[in-house]
Amino acid sequence: MEEHVIMQHSKLRLGTFALLFALFFGAIGAGTVLAAQTYMVNARSDLRSALNNLEDAQTNKGGHRVNAINLVKQAINEVNLGIQYAQ
C-alpha cells in the first residue's frame, strides 16, 4: 500500500515537473524559431505521457489530481501554440 502511495506521488510530481518545464520553455522559447522544434515536440510528448499517468491514477486526491490534469492539458495547449507561433 505504501509503495502505491509513493508511486502516485511520483506521478503527480512528474506531471507537475512536466508542466513547469513546458511553461518555462514555452515562455522563453515561444519567440525563438527552432528548425525542428525538437524540444517543444519532446515536451509535448512528455506532457501527454504525464496526462495519461494522471488520468490512470486513483481519484482519491482531494481534487489535486483533477487540477493537475487540467493544468497539464493547458500546458499541452500552450506548447502547441508555441510550436505554431515559431513556424
Image (cartoon, rainbow, N blue to C red):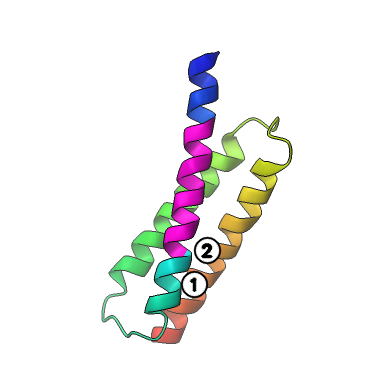
- Secondary structure at numbered mark 2: helix
Q: Is residue 14 magenta?
A: yes
Magenta residues (range) = 9-22
In the shown orientation, is residue 16 left or right of residue 37? Answer: right
Q: Residues within 10 Å of mark 2 (few under 14, many from 20)?
A: many
Determine the CA span between mark 1 and mark 2. Answer: 6 Å
Label 2 sits on residue = 76
Which quadrant: the C terminus? bottom left
Rendering quarter of residue 1? top right
**Residue 36: x percent and y percent?**
27, 76
Q: Residue at x 56, y 56 (%)?
A: 72
Circles 1 and 2 in contact, beta carbons < 8 Å: yes
Which amino acid does the dot numbered 2 rest on? Ile
Q: Residues within 10 Å of mark 1 (few under 14, many from 20)?
A: some
Q: Residue at x 39, y 77 (%)?
A: 28
- Secondary structure at numbered mark 1: helix
**Residue 73: x percent and y percent?**
59, 59
Q: From this viewpoint, which residue is outermost toward the right?
A: 62
Label 1 sits on residue = 80
